[in-house]
Image (spheres, rainbow, N blue to C red):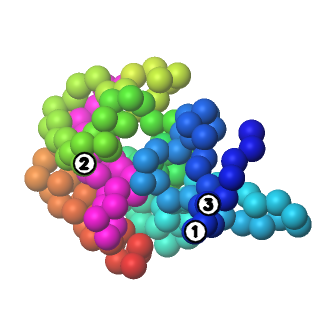
Amino acid sequence: MVRRVDGLGRIVIPKEIRKVLKIKENEQVEINVDDDSIVLKRYSELDKYDVSLTNLIDCIKEVYNLDILLTNLNSFVLTSNSYKDFLGLEISPYLNNILEKRKEVYEHIPIVLSLNENKEDIKVSYIIKTVIKNGDIVGLLILLQDGNLENNDLKVLELLNKFLDKYLE
């Protein structure tokens, strides 16, 4: 495909390409130069986590027996060890809907949850919170428990959310 550069240096990424790469409206794109090429890549601040965030999620699993999953706008980027096979997989339409509507969902007793279209649904209690930075949606924070959730579990999620706020500054 060939596109013109306008007077302000802008080009339009064709809809077909945005659809294939799952680039959503208002999503950030990273621009790199590779020799004589310009390379565009979806960008998420949540993709660039370090060991401190991984360690925190591991500690939450050990101390509270709660599983944590973190997504960017399209896929799972960080999970507890129990859900490592979800890393890099796309989020389900259900999770995508929560993301787009900036919702918070709290299911205190186990019900069926779809995390990914190609994986079997799971029966868990869960809290799903949209992660927002500077007014922009950056992903989802998901807390899972095999049994019933309690108020302290909500506090753990709030702690992790506050940590993410500081982490993303």
Per the image, label 3 sits on a secondary structure element best described as loop
Residue 46 x %, y % = 48, 61
| Amino acid found under the numbered disc labelled 1 | Leu
Q: Is residue 60 left or right of residue 119?
A: left
Residue at the extreme right of the image, as rendered: 35
CA neighbours of label 2 inside 10 A, class few (<14), some (14 to 19), many (20+)? some
In magenta segment, residue 88: no
> Image point 62% across, 55% down: which residue?
11
Q: Residue at x 60, y 40 (%)?
A: 14
Q: Main secondary structure of the magenta part?
A: strand
In this view, 59 is above or below 68 = below
Amino acid type, mark 3: Asp
Q: Is residue 49 visible?
A: yes
Residue 16 appears at what percent x and percent y? 60, 33
Drawn side of residue 19 relative to residue 62, left or right:
right
Residue 159 location in percent, x, y?
25, 67
Query: Element under label 1?
Result: loop
Mark before the other along the chain sequence, 2 or 3: 3
The label shown at residue 102 is 2
Residue 63, by quadrant, is bottom left
Asked if the residue at tag 1 contacts the one at tag 3, i.e. Cβ–Cβ closer than 8 Å, the answer is yes
Q: Which mark is residue 6?
A: 3
Q: Residue at x 31, y 43 (%)?
A: 100
Residue 84 seen by the camera: no
Q: Nearer the viewer, residue 124 or 127?
A: 127
The residue to which callout 1 is attached is 8
